[in-house]
Image (cartoon, rainbow, N blue to C red):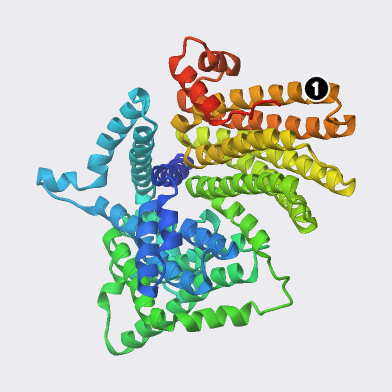
Amino acid sequence: MDFFSILTLVGGLALFLYGMSVMEEGLSKVSGGKLERILENLTSSPLKAVLLGAGVTAVIQSSSATTVMVVGFVNSGIMKLSQAVGVIMGANIGTTATSWILSLSGIESDNFFIQLLNPNSFSPILALIGVAIIMFAKSEKKKDIAMIMVGFAVLMFGMETMSGAVEPLAEVPEFTSILTRFSNPLLGMLAGLVLTAIIQSSSASVGILQALCLTGAVPYSAALPIIMGQNIGTCVTALLSAIGAKKNAKRAAMVHLYFNIIGTIIFMSLYYLLHLFFDFSFMEQAAIPAGIAVIHSMFNVFTTLILLPFSKGLEKLATLTIRDKAEKEVSKEEQEFLTLDSRFLEQPGFALEQSRHASSRMAEEAKKCLETAIGLMADYDNEKTEEVEKIEQKVDRYEDELGTYLVKLSRKNLSEADSHLVSIMLHCIGDFERISDHGVNIMEAAREMNSKKLNFSKDAREELGVLMNAVTEIVVRTCKVFENQDAQLARTIEPLEEVIDELNQELKTRHINRLQEGQCTIEMGFILSDVTTSLERIADHCSNVAVCIMQVQEDAYDTHSFLGQVRSGKNEEFEAMLEKERSAYVLPKAM
């Protein structure tokens, strides 16, 4: 085998791994986190967990990705360790789907239609269709599907290139002698383990083994231990992801490792025991890709059937390995932030979903902060004052954690729709944080009035009540707009914000009149001005959120011109909504 043959082999391997990566990425984007959400919610029984783990892994083509997700679920408290065990078992079964697809490359027939079943026959067609869609289609969803098609075609081309490069090795005695040594169970398992640990994918390492089998130089006696080692090697990814995680997340990774180690011991022991009594002559025959797929599936299905009834035992074993220590108890608040787990970033669709939930919680906390602060203006309470401060600190933390997480997420390969959603959240979390800040300002005004025994006049209280009702409504409406990404409801925010500006201006005018008539003091005027200014600013931030959502949905990024169109006197829809809001929030007649 000369230098150029080695170069061809390395190039084929690179294309194979790249094609698998592209296909996995495309599948992940098409699923958009939906599969992970199903995994999160539907693991009530062990059998259901196994089926879901198998199904999700078969679709996203990576048991490592599924297991890392499960470690993240357990770490953030979304999933219990007992639920994770079944999913991990199912993931091992699901990963065999790739080997079955690749085994179709061994199909040979003179029949045209049977020949089409061979991936080497139909992958060029997939490549042609996929490239055409990527070049000419405008739909992001179609392009993601095209990525899957092109990825599969590249994968198959890489496998064919590898097979062609290693084919001459079948005639090289040194090569065949090395493969024969892998018939030793320990050496074979070590080889499979190391290869899989390096490339971080059992599907890819099994595919490489199938490519070698096409040379006819790999006997089943060598392939069997290698496959066992590959199943153990795939645990490395989950073990690495569990570093720094909570003890239950580490236990989930250990369950994956123990499942494969115990399964390998039982499977290999049973095989060699039977081999003593029955001569498995086929083991010295040359392995074929379909045979590799059969062994890979048999091992994982067999191990699952044997160990599923003892899932509690696996859980116990993992608990004994990762013992309970004096681990700081995680508060409910801390648990909320653990859902922004860095492990989820490897599945951007699901990470985006977690970010969306967290940003919605942040919006609700900002609303709660404002409502509690407004309540203090009428009925002051020291405990409620402390609550406002705590909520504001929580909202501040949300902004820091979410902002950092979303920046990391924005660097991932996202679809156009997902990129828009990340942009919306990055833009809006700052506005929700400022709403909570203004809530604190209102609370401080209430605290000052309480400490100095000050009160607004009856007229001022009634007028301020109308303004507060309008601001409360605009915040409630904005939270709904943000939660549902509702561009239609967002159009109702700007007219209400205009009405709040008008109310604020009228309140200031009336205050000056009362001041001139001696019905109000300068000190109360300062407090009133602080409160009304905070309320007006809150409405402005609500407007920012609504405009952001409308802009992204309608691809109109020039804010000033966009607002000009919305507020234009020629816009009859806007004028009608403006009049409706004016009639809903009317100040009492000045005395």
Residue 420, image x, y percentages: 51, 32
Above or below 223: residue 354: above
Question: Is the residue 378 above or below the residue 240 in the image?
Answer: above
Q: How many labels does the image show?
A: 1
Residue 582 vs residue 141, the one in the foreground: 582
Q: Quadrant of residue 446?
A: top right
Q: Is residue 315 visible?
A: yes
Q: Where is residue 254 in the image (x, y as percent from the top left)?
A: 56, 72
What residue does disc 1 label? 512
Q: How crowded is mark 1: few (under 14 residues within 10 Å), some or many (20 or more)?
A: some
Residue at the (51%, 17%) spot, across then down: 566
Q: Which residue is drawn at 31% across and 34% down?
A: 127
Is 320 left, or right, of 297 in this rendering? Answer: right
- Quarter of the figure that contains the C terminus: top right
Q: Quadrant of residue 8?
A: top left
Residue 26 image position (x, y, % from top left) = 41, 42
Residue at the farthest bottom position = 277
Q: In this view, does 479 lie to the left or right of 520?
A: left
- Taking depth in this image into account, of 3 and 57 the one nearest to the observer is 57
Looking at the image, the residue that sits furthest to the front is 591
Amino acid at the residue labelled 1:
Ile
Check disc 1 and report its element: helix, strand or loop.
helix
Between 473 and 477, which is closer to the camera in this rendering? 473
Residue 195 seen in the current view = no
Residue drawn at x 50%, y 80% is 314
